[in-house]
Amino acid sequence: MLEKNILVKLFVAVFILVVIFSAPVFAMTSAEISSQVEVKGWKYVIDASEEMVDTAKFKKDGPYTIGYVTIFMSNSWSTQMKEEIMVEAEKQEMVESIVHLDAQLEVAKQISAVEDLVAKGVDAIVIDPVSPQAMQGVLTMAQDNGIPVIAISSQIPLEQVTAWVGRDDKEYGRVTAQWLVEELGYKGNIVALSGIAGNPVTEQRWAGAEEVFKENEDIEVITREFADWGFAQAKSAMANILSAYPQIDAVWSGGGAMTQGAMEAYSDAGREMIPMVGEANNGFLLDWIEASQNGFSSIAFNNPTSHSAIGLKLALKALNGEPIPEQLNVTAPYIFTLQDAEKYADENLEDGYWVGTTLSREKIEELWSK
C-alpha cells in the first residue's frame, strides 16, 4: 500500500524540467519540459506549480550580486546546501558574487540580515526563512525595493515571496508515519523526535505524521521530544525516554542525525533495536545497513541539498524578467529503502554527507572525505 502511494505521489501531475541542472539560466517554457532529468545517477523529479509569477518588474541588467540567507550553519545539511549555491554561482556568468549571511536560529538576526542586504543593494535574495510569520514584513519590503526573493527549504506562504523551492515536509511526516504504522501492524507505542521547536520544517513534518497517528486508534505517541536534528541531543533524549518508558515499539524521527542518536542510545542500553525512520544522510544509511543484519528495519526520506542552487537559477530567471513557477517541489528520489541505502551509502565519506546532491565527486570528497 505504502509503495503504491509513493509511486502515485512521484509520477502523477509532475512537471520534469530538463534544463534545471544543465542550462546557464533556468528555462521554464513548456517546450523544455520532459519526463525525467538524470544528474550524476540521480533521477530528479521537479513538481512545478501551474501558477507562474510575472517577474517583469524585477528585470535588470547584470552582472548580479545575490544575497544568500540561512537559518543556521551548525549542521552538515546546511553546509552542503551552501556549497551547492556557491558552486552553481561559479557556473553562472551573470553572477558577480554571493553575499552569505547566517541567522544563527534568531529571527531578529535574519530580519537584520535581509535589511542589510537591501541596504547594500543586492539584486536578489535566496533565503531559508526562520519564521514565516516574523519574516513577512521584511521580505515584502525587499520585493517592494525591486529585489526578487526566492525562499528555499522551509515552507512559507507564497504571497510573502516571489517563489519557493523545497520539498513537501508534510508528506515526509505522512509517508514515514504510515510506514511505521504498517510496520507495527497498526498497534503500538511510538516515540517522536522532532527538530527545532517552532521551525516550519519541524512543524510541517510533525503535522503530517500526527495526522496519520491520529487516524489509527491503537497507535499511541507516548512522548514527543525536540532534539534540534542533532545526534548528541537525540541520543540524550532517547536515553532519558528509555528510562521512563518500559514499552516502546517504534521511533518516528523528524530527520537529520536524530535517528542515529536514537540508535546509539538503544545500543548503549543493550536494548533490542526497534523500527525507526530516518533521513538520507550518509551516517544513518551506514548505520542502517549494519543494523539491518540484526533485523533492524527502516525507511529514509531523501532531502536534496540542491534547493539553494535551484533557488539561484530561479532568481536569475526573475532578474531576466521571465516568468517562473510559483513553487517547485524537489525530490530525488522520494523514499529510500534498504536497497537504496546499500546503493548510495559511502564508507569513504563522513557521516555528514547528504546523498542526492548535484555536487561533483571531487567537491563531495573535498567536503566529506574521511
Image (cartoon, grey):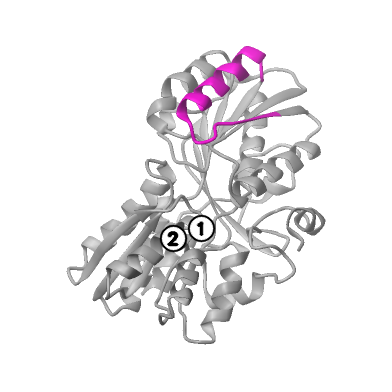
Residue type at mark 1 is: Ala
Q: Residues within 10 Å of mark 2 (few under 14, many from 20)?
A: some
Q: Disc 1 versus disc 2: distance between alpha carbons?
A: 6 Å
Q: Residue at x 60, y 66 (%)?
A: 283
Q: Percent x, y for residue 172?
A: 42, 57
The answer to whether residue 256 shows anywhere in this view is no
Drawn side of residue 251 relative to residue 145, left or right: left
Decide which of 119, 317 is in the foreground and name it. 119
Instruction: Point out which mark residue 236 bears.
Output: 2
Viewport quadrant of the C terminus: bottom right
Q: Is residue 164 above or below residue 185?
A: above
Q: Residue at x 66, y 39 (%)?
A: 27
Decide which of 178, 296 is in the foreground and name it. 296
Q: Is the C-beta separation of discs 1 and 2 under 8 Å?
A: yes
Q: Percent x, y for residue 337?
A: 52, 74
When asked about the image quadrant of residue 181, the answer is: bottom left
Drawn side of residue 96 relative to residue 315, left or right: right
Q: Percent x, y for residue 191?
A: 32, 65
Which residue appears farthest toward the bottom when viewing the image? 294
Magenta span: 99-122
Q: Does the stretch in magenta take in 117?
A: yes
When asked about the image quadrant of residue 248, the answer is: bottom left
Q: Which residue is mark 1?
A: 232
Q: Does the stretch in magenta take in 353?
A: no
